[in-house]
Structure formats: C-alpha cells, structure tokens
Amino acid sequence: MYQALYRKWRPRTFDDVVGQAHITDTLKRQVEGNRLSHAYLFTGTRGTGKTTCAKILARAVNCEHPVQGNPCNACPACLGIESGAILDVLELDAASNNGVDQVRALRDEAVYTPAAVRKRVYIVDEVHMLSTPAFNALLKILEEPPEHLMFILATTELHKVPATIKSRCQQFAFKRILPGDITQRLGYVARQEGLDLTADAAALLARLADGGLRDALSLLDQCSGGGGTIDESRVLGTLGLAGNLETARLMELISAGDAAQALETLDRLYRAGKDVSSMLSELSGLTRDLLLRRTAPQGAATLLTGGFDESTMRSLGERFTAPRLMQMLTLLQQTLADLGRSTNRRTDAELCLIRLCDITLDDSLTGLTARLARLEQLMSCAVSVPAPVAAPVKPKPKQDDLPPWEEERPPLPPEPEEAPTPQIPTPPRQETSKPEPAPAAANGEFWPSFCAGLHGLVPPSAHPLLTNAAMVTGTWSSGVLTLWVRDEFTKALLNKPAITEAMAKAASTRFGQPTRVVFTIGKAPAQSSAPAPQPAPEADALDQLLDFGSKFDNIVIE
C-alpha cells in the first residue's frame, strides 16, 4: 500500500528534524541528564515538527537504550510506541475531545502507573480547541502530576491557550523552516525515492511551502504522480500557478498602466487553467518583495521570497514608489480576502487589475496617498525647454530664375520738380528730451499682452491660469522668460513641455532671439519706472523775437 511521502519520511530521531536545532538540542540534553519536565507546550505554524518532536520525545523518555538523547528505535518500548501497541502513550486530538467529560476521564485514568513503559505520556494536539471547562479540569493535574506522568501539548494558536496552562509548561516555539533547508531535504527525499527533481523545481516547492516541510513533501508527492522529470514548468502546471515570468510581465503592464494587455494576460492564464487566487497571490508576493527592497534595501535580502532574480527585481523596483507599492499590496490583500465569498472570482480579479493599472480609480486612503506622492515626484522634476531652432534663411532667387512678370524693370523717369513755395519760417522750438520708453518685458503691460498672444498656442486648461495675476506673473530679460508662480502646485501644473515650449516660441518671435523658460516661486520684483522728464527751461521771448526779425533783413519791399 502506498504511503504518503510526509508520513514515510517523518523524522524518527531528534537529529533528523530539520531547522529546529534550538529545540532538539535542548530536549536531547534533558533526556541525557534525566532532567525532564512533567509538561511541555510546543507552538508554531503547521508542518514545522511539533507532533514529530512530541512522538520522538515520548519514545526517548521510555527508550531502554537511548543514544545521546535520541531513541534507539530498536528496543521493544520504541517499537511498541511507534506501532501503537503500547497504550501507555496516547495521542489525542483536542478538536474531537474538547469537552470537560473527556478531560475528566483522562485525568482519572492518568493516576494509574504505566504497564509496559516507565512513563505514561499524553500527546494532546491542537490543545487550543479545548473548552474553558476542559482547560480548568486539566489545570489541576498539570499543577500536581504523578511522577510517572508527562503531558506534551501542541498548538498552532498560542494566544488561545490560557495563561494558567502556559505557566505550568515548558514552552518551545517552533520557527518556520528556511527555504534552503527545505530544498536540501527535498533533494534527499527525491534521491531516495528515485525521483528526477531539478534544483529549480525544488527551490520553487520550498518557496511555496511557506516554511512547512510537511507541505513541501505533500507538493512533491503531488507533482511526482505522472512520472518523468519534475522541473519548474511541471510544478507550475500541476499546481495551477502562473509562474515568475508571467507575474513579472503582469507587473510591467501594471507599471505602464496598460489595463487592456493586463486583462488579456489574465484571460490567457485563466483559460490555461490557472487559478485567479493563485495569480493574485503571486502578484502580492512580488509586490511585497519590491516594497521590502525599497523600504529596507540593506536587510531585505533575507526577507525576500527568493522567487525572482536580481535584475528583474531591480528593473521593477525603479518603476514604483513606496506609497504606490503600499496601495497595490493593500488592494491585492483585500481582493484575496474577499475572493472566498465572491460569486464571480474572475470578475473580482479583473476589477482588481483595472484599479492597479489606473490609480485614479482607487478612492481609498492608500490610493490617495499614492497619488499625492506621484504628484510630489512630478513637481520635483524640472522640465528643461530647449532653445528654438532658427528657421533657415531662404536664399534669394537669381535673376535668371525669376518669372517674366517679376524680372527687373528699368526705373521710371523722375517726375518734374515743382517750384518751392516760399514759406514763412517759424521760430525754432527748443525740443525737450523725452525719456526712452521702458522695454515691453519690464513694464506691467508686458505679461497681459504676452498672455493674450498665447491664446490658441497653449492648452486651453493652462490659459486661465496664466492670465491669473494672483498666481502667475512673467518677465523677460536677455533671452530668459521668468515665470513667477505662487507655489509648487502652480509650478507643477505649468511646468509641462506643451506649455513651456509654446511660451518659449512666442517670446522668441516677439523679441527676435532664442528664449528659455525659467520658473521661480515667489512674487516678481517691482519694476523700476523710468524717471519723469524734467521740463526744459523756458527761452526768453525778446531773444526769440530778435532772432526771428534778423531773417528779414535782406528782403526789399518795392
């Protein structure tokens, strides 16, 4: 009869337990020194070795010939406990025996000395499932147990165990097994079973096991059903996963905001038999890795799942900010939590992808935070406007190339000169010096007239903002058009190529030289007005009359 791999390759000694040396070493020393406690509490996630270590400890304390704290697994006590023939070692399921009556019966039976071994051992699995009266009934015997009695309690939810029970037990916390240790164990089991398991497939199975060796062996057992080589593509196909390449491609489409291609990718994977929950879970794992790399770049290497190469992680990490990754991860986690009670899982996955591609559709707090962070990033990036290129001067056509009607004609004869009409000279006026008008870029009339000329050149949304004197004012000097804006938000709205290039071109045309646009936050300095003209000193009226009369000295009146 076929036996599952996780049962067939269950460790039989403390030395065979993978990834829990901090616990197995302590238990071995206690067995060797005969310093055993009457109650143990094993805690940790699934598949980390709690029940396995409990069974090994039950055999070790009753073994007739222990080997450095390990059971020999050859004496009658070890063989009887392992086969279940010795009834002094019992394994109970608290989920099925959680009532106070079952615990009272256990308590009444525990006072009797064992018949075939030295210690009577009760292994209570999932002890957190006991009711409150059952815990109270168990408390008395844990507090004052007989010398021949030992309790080994195991649970995955330590917070549900009462503090009174914890205080009477030696507590050991089983940690998640590292992916590298799981990979080595899978390779060893595959070689012993004659399975052709590639290194990439073993690493993928270790990552999917999430720290549980039992889950990894179960996945290997599932993938080995068809025979042949077990590689990464076979694991992905058997378990209904999208794969690292497809997940990275989907993340690239999200960064580009291409919702159409993302939905097509989801549809292709869905038709290929991939589960939408698995696809979103892989996308969530990649988003988590990117967020950890950006948040803690120095120490994130040990926290990553290890499913993606460094070049892919670096390329994708440059496309997102930390608030954006937070928004994506929150949305993915919420969608995954809601898929269990969804009536149409595919539709929910498609809605999630659409929100991921278009951040404006996410009205949550994390979505608004990501949009503000994106706006701040755009505002901090200055846009440089290139100087306009002067239009090439069209050469003047030669005389031979001119059409007949544009050929050079002989000049017309000069018109006869008319006799000049004598005019009475007027006394000369002493001209007063007028001040030179200020250039158009320096006085207050430049910016309104300049904005009027921009109508139709800049986008319609920008023209009302440019004409608002309270928010924007412009000055021009020496080929530089300076825009004095009120705040960073106004600068971000105007600092766009379509707007700055149009203003630079208009200023170049107006002043006849290349112009570049510069933004400055603040108010424009007050323009110094030209000095008022001083009135010329009035001339003496008698001197003007004498000067005028001297012009008629040579005129003879007949």
Image (cartoon, helix red, strand yellow):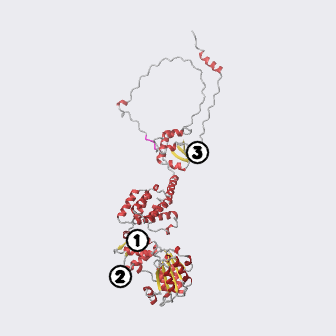
Disc sitting over residue 235 in the figure: none
Q: Which residue is mark 3?
A: 523
Depth check, mark 1 against mark 2: the one in front is 2
| Mark 1: secondary structure | helix
- Which of the 4 quarters of the picture holds residue 147? bottom right
Instruction: Indicate the position of residue 558 as horizontal and vertical percent values.
Output: 57, 9
- The magenta region covers 388-392
- Which residue is painted at 41% across and 36% down in the image? 396
- Which residue is painted at 60% across and 24% down in the image? 429
Is 389 within the magenta?
yes
The one nearer the camera, 145 or 83, is 145
User: What's the CA distance linking mark 3 and mark 2?
Assistant: 88 Å
Q: Which residue is mark 1?
A: 200
- Which of the 4 quarters of the picture holds residue 219? bottom left
Disc sitting over residue 1 in the figure: 2
Crowd class of label 3 (few under 14; some 14 to 19; many from 20; radius 10 Å): some
Q: Is residue 402 above or below residue 65?
A: above
Q: Amino acid at mark 2?
A: Met
- Which residue is painted at 47% across and 65% down in the image? 288
Q: Earlier in the sequence, mark 3 or mark 1?
A: 1
The one nearer the camera, 411 or 153, is 153
Q: Amino acid at mark 3?
A: Lys
| Mark 2: secondary structure | loop
> Which quarter of the rendering shows the N terminus?
bottom left
Instruction: Indicate the position of residue 377 as horizontal and vertical percent values.
Output: 51, 55
